[in-house]
Image (cartoon, grey):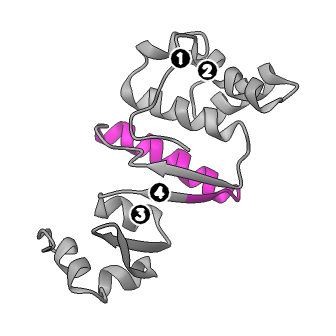
């Protein structure tokens, strides 16, 4: 799971990843941690304190920490919220790479463009309930519910 606001330990970037690997009982923590940092483009920042990294770098570090465990499913909660366009592109590239490697990505987002770019299926929630489930193209072309249609138009769904 990667949260909207990543939590960084008071350690270097590589030590943040190593800590997750240690908890999971991985034997070659150092090699696995550096490989995960490579995968998200942060190897050069391995020894920098995690808490001084930019917002986008911290989010990629949080992704590396999760990715190092080679999960079958990775849950992402608004992974690019509050990031600038450049950092958003970098995080989205990492997400695409994880998806291409076979990890199932389940992501919560309010960003319609991001849902179109990254999604293959949309589950639209309204008032805590799934009210629509469709392939991404079908969802945007012809939403099945009034609530989803209003959201896509930029209107606030009622109720």
- Residue matched to label 2: 16
- Residue matched to label 4: 107
Q: Which mark is residue 117?
A: 3
Q: Is residue 157 left or right of residue 127?
A: left
Magenta range is 84-105
Q: Secondary structure beneath disc 4? A: strand
Q: Quadrant of residue 61?
A: top right
Q: CA distance from mark 4 to mark 1?
A: 24 Å
For label 4, the crowd category at 10 Å Cα-Cα, with few meaning under 14, some 14 to 19 and many 20 or more, is some
- Residue matched to label 1: 9
Considering depth in this image, is 74 or 100 the residue closer to the camera?
Answer: 74
| 87 within the magenta span | yes
Q: CA distance from mark 1 to mark 3?
A: 31 Å
Give the image location of residue 89, x and y in percent. Answer: 40, 45
| Contact (Cβ within 8 Å) of mark 1 with mark 2 | yes
Count the marks.
Answer: 4
């Amino acid at each position: 799971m990667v949260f909207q606001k990543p939590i960084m330990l008071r350690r270097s970037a590589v030590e943040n990843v190593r800590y997750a690997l240690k908890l999971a009982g991985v034997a070659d923590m150092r090699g696995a941690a550096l490989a995960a940092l490579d995968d998200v483009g942060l190897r050069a920042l391995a020894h920098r304190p995690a808490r001084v990294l930019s917002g986008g770098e911290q989010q990629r570090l949080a992704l590396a920490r999760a990715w190092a465990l080679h999960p079958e499913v990775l849950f992402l909660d608004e992974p690019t919220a509050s990031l600038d366009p450049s950092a958003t592109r970098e995080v989205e590239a990492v997400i695409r790479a994880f998806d291409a490697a076979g990890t199932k990505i389940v992501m919560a987002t309010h960003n319609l463009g991001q849902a179109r770019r990254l999604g293959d299926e949309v589950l639209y929630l309204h008032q805590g309930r799934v009210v629509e489930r469709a392939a991404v193209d079908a969802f945007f072309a012809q939403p099945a519910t009034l609530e989803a249609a209003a959201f896509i138009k930029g209107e606030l769904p009622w109720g």
